[in-house]
Image (cartoon, helix red, strand yellow):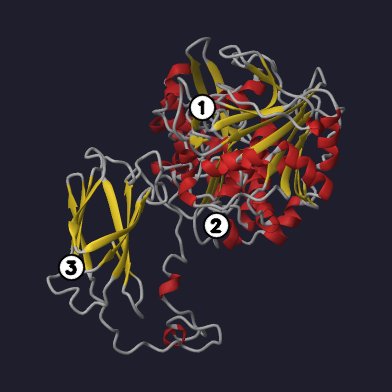
């Protein structure tokens, strides 16, 4: 353990850096779970912020309030921040990303400040990092990955991985947290870094995690605890402009040097993904100076979120769907639903699941383009404890003028953005909502939820650990809407008079010939190009070998007309799953400078050989270069970029 001396303004707190020794080393894998989803980093960040705040709501609060502000630091505040984050810390961050070839990071000039109110703060023991389980939110937030204080809870989150998004939002992968804890109302200030990978610094290897706090003891019993008293906390609140005082429980997160946040886009994402808890009055969000609450969300949505923008965010919260959501929420809240019989399997949801008179009335309402709502009881069977009868609501509306299906699944406050999948997805043009408010059913579905909270996966170990027949319950919830629609329509889709409308012109409309083709911004038809020139032939080729590759002329005479020397850069990477191999290259995978790699051949000279890149000059028309030494058990990707000596464009080959 290495501890730099602490600055006077921050009292006894200091950064501590950890040598690898035994235990986990390498790079963080949690971010890979979030990189797979279609939503961008801002959507992921906001979802994590809001779901954590909603999960931490105290019973006495009427709602949760979250504020987000980008703070430009004053000269005095920047000076204070430079004591919290000294130059050595920035140097260490730089060493953790050698493949990015970054200049030394500048001192922190701005911070993203995220505060929640009406919440409990980070509760639990502050001085025993070995404690786990319910209520140990302090340890779960700062010291756990893949598990959390909400493990097997009924809230919105619980995978214990989402907090990595806070670190990835910071340009130096560092955050600070100031919390006032409900109950004791004590203060705690703490900091942490989670670099992308372990790194070398000052001739030693260091782990990617580091902590800022008050250090005590010696390994293996060394502890780091938060700063709880002193002027440093007062200055922290003052310089960073926090709204929180010691009288307001909750958490204030400081993210130094954050990615640039587009305020309008953040508002759009908030409305699109958290319309339900805001409309219910459970959540109030302020982004810069824009306050989003039940009284304003409908008007703000009309101003900020067009139908095209809602769909671009991979949601269905168009204007029409938002009106449907508001109606559905009101119906569920008032209990204006038809209660079905207990469902024991998805394929058993039939006409027999409903009272005959109630079913006939719902069919009449559906055919008249009215909204229908059903409450489905379902049995949840925990492995410990007795069977629990839970329920969820399904809402359905089939307006005549809808141009595509619109469907959502909302578990408590959270939009499960990629559900339902498979047979549970609507095929007919209708609006549908599956609404899960029951705490015990939510707990089961959370056990089946992937870390991104976008879909359910019945193969996750948590589900079978905690429940019997959990996959059956997931299937019922996932498919109930489509099964219910089949019952309403008796297996026949509602007649769609507009299905083929786009293929035929209506009387009085412009002829098809006049509207055919795309136009330029000035309204003129673009000219069709004449003869398209043939592609420029490749000069070099890559032949794969068992442990590397051979680079040679593409043809025997390919280099005879080239302007030598030819400057070539070859790039290598091991291929993974669902990733661009080159962007995911990690220096821990391999380094071409290592002695294990061999470069042989003739007619070339090496310019540079480091990390995953090899630069060389082709000096003879009959050159050949062979690279060997790669792991034969991994699939290798290779690509070239080369440029002739004079007045020639760069050419790519892969």
Q: Residue 311 carries which label?
A: 2
Q: Which one is in front in this view, the residue at disc 2 or the one at disc 3?
A: 3
Mark 3 sits on what residue?
554
What's the CA distance linking mark 2 and mark 3? 46 Å
Q: Residue 146 carries which label?
A: 1
Figure quadrant of residue 242: top right
Does residue 610 appear to the left or right of 62 in the view shown?
A: left
Which mark is first along the chain, 1 or 3? 1
What residue lies at 49% left-to-right and 36% top-to-bottom?
199
Q: Where is residue 654 in the image (x, y as percent from the top left)?
A: 28, 60
Extreme residue toward the top, this view:
385
- Looking at the picture, does residue 533 appear above or below residue 106? below
Q: Position of residue 294 (x, y in %)?
A: 77, 45
Secondary structure beneath dot 1 equals: loop
Q: Where is residue 539 in the image (x, y as percent from the top left)?
A: 23, 71
Marks 3,1: beta carbons within 8 A: no
Which mark is first along the chain, 1 or 2? 1
Does residue 456 appear to the left or right of 173 in the view shown?
A: left
What's the CA distance linking mark 2 and mark 1? 31 Å
Label 2 crowd (10 A; few <14 / some 14-19 / many >=20):
some
Q: Residue 26 carries which label?
A: none
Q: Position of residue 363 (x, y in %)?
A: 52, 45
Count of all numbered marks drawn on residues in the image: 3
Relative depth, front residue between 469 and 559:
559
């Amino acid at each position: 353990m290495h501890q730099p001396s602490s600055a006077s303004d921050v009292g006894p707190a200091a950064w501590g850096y950890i040598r690898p020794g035994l235990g986990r080393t390498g790079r963080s894998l949690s971010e890979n779970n979030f990189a797979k989803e279609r939503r961008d980093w801002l959507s992921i960040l906001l979802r994590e912020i809001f779901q954590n705040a909603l999960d931490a709501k105290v019973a006495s609060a009427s709602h949760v309030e979250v504020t987000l502000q980008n703070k430009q630091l004053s000269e005095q505040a920047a000076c204070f921040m430079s004591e919290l984050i000294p130059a050595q810390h920035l140097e260490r961050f730089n060493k953790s990303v050698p493949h990015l070839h970054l200049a030394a990071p500048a001192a922190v000039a701005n911070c993203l400040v995220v505060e929640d109110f009406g919440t409990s703060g980070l509760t639990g023991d502050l001085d025993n990092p070995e404690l786990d389980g319910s209520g140990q939110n302090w340890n779960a937030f700062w010291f756990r990955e893949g598990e959390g204080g909400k493990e097997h809870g009924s809230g919105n989150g619980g995978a214990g991985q989402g907090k990595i998004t806070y670190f990835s939002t910071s340009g130096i992968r560092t955050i600070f947290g100031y919390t006032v804890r409900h109950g004791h109302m004590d203060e705690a200030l703490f900091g942490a870094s989670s670099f992308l990978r372990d790194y070398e610094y000052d001739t030693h290897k260091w782990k990617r995690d580091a902590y800022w706090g008050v250090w005590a003891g010696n390994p293996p019993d060394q502890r780091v605890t938060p700063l709880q008293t002193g002027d440093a906390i007062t200055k922290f609140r003052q310089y960073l402009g926090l709204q929180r005082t010691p009288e307001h429980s909750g958490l204030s997160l400081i993210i130094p040097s954050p990615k640039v946040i587009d305020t309008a886009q953040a508002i759009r994402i908030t409305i699109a993904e958290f319309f339900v808890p805001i409309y219910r009055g459970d959540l109030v969000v302020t982004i810069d100076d824009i306050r989003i609450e039940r009284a304003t969300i409908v008007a703000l949505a009309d101003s900020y979120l067009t139908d095209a923008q809602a769909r671009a965010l991979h949601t269905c919260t168009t204007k029409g769907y938002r009106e449907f959501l508001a109606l559905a929420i009101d119906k569920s809240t008032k209990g204006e639903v038809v209660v079905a019989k207990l469902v024991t399997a998805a394929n058993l949801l039939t006409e027999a699941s409903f009272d005959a008179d109630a079913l006939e009335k719902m069919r009449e309402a559906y055919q008249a383009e009215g909204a229908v709502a059903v409450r489905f009881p379902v049995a949840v069977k925990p492995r410990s404890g007795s069977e629990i009868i839970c329920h969820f609501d399904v809402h359905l509306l089939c307006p005549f003028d809808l141009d595509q299906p619109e469907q959502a699944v909302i578990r408590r406050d959270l939009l499960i953005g990629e559900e339902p999948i498979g047979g549970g997805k609507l095929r007919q043009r209708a609006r549908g909502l599956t609404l899960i408010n029951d705490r015990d059913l939510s707990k089961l579905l959370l056990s089946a939820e992937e870390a991104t909270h976008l879909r359910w996966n019945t193969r996750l170990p948590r589900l079978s650990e905690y429940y019997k027949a959990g996959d059956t319950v997931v299937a019922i919830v996932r498919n109930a809407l489509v099964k219910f629609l089949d019952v309403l329509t008796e297996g026949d889709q509602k007649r769609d008079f507009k299905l083929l409308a786009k293929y035929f012109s209506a009387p009085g409309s412009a002829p098809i010939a006049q509207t055919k083709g795309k136009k330029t911004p000035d309204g003129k038809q673009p000219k069709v190009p004449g003869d398209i020139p043939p592609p420029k032939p490749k000069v070099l080729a890559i032949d794969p070998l068992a442990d590397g590759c051979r680079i040679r002329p593409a043809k025997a005479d390919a280099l005879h007309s080239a302007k030598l020397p030819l400057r070539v850069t070859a790039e290598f990477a091991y291929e993974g799953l669902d990733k661009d191999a080159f962007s995911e290259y990690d220096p821990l995978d391999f380094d071409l400078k290592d002695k294990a790699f061999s470069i042989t051949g003739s007619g070339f000279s090496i310019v540079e050989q480091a990390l995953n890149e090899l630069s060389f000059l082709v000096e003879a028309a009959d050159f050949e270069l062979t690279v060997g030494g790669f792991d034969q058990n991994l699939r290798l990707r290779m690509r070239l970029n080369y440029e002739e000596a004079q007045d020639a464009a760069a050419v790519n080959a892969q």
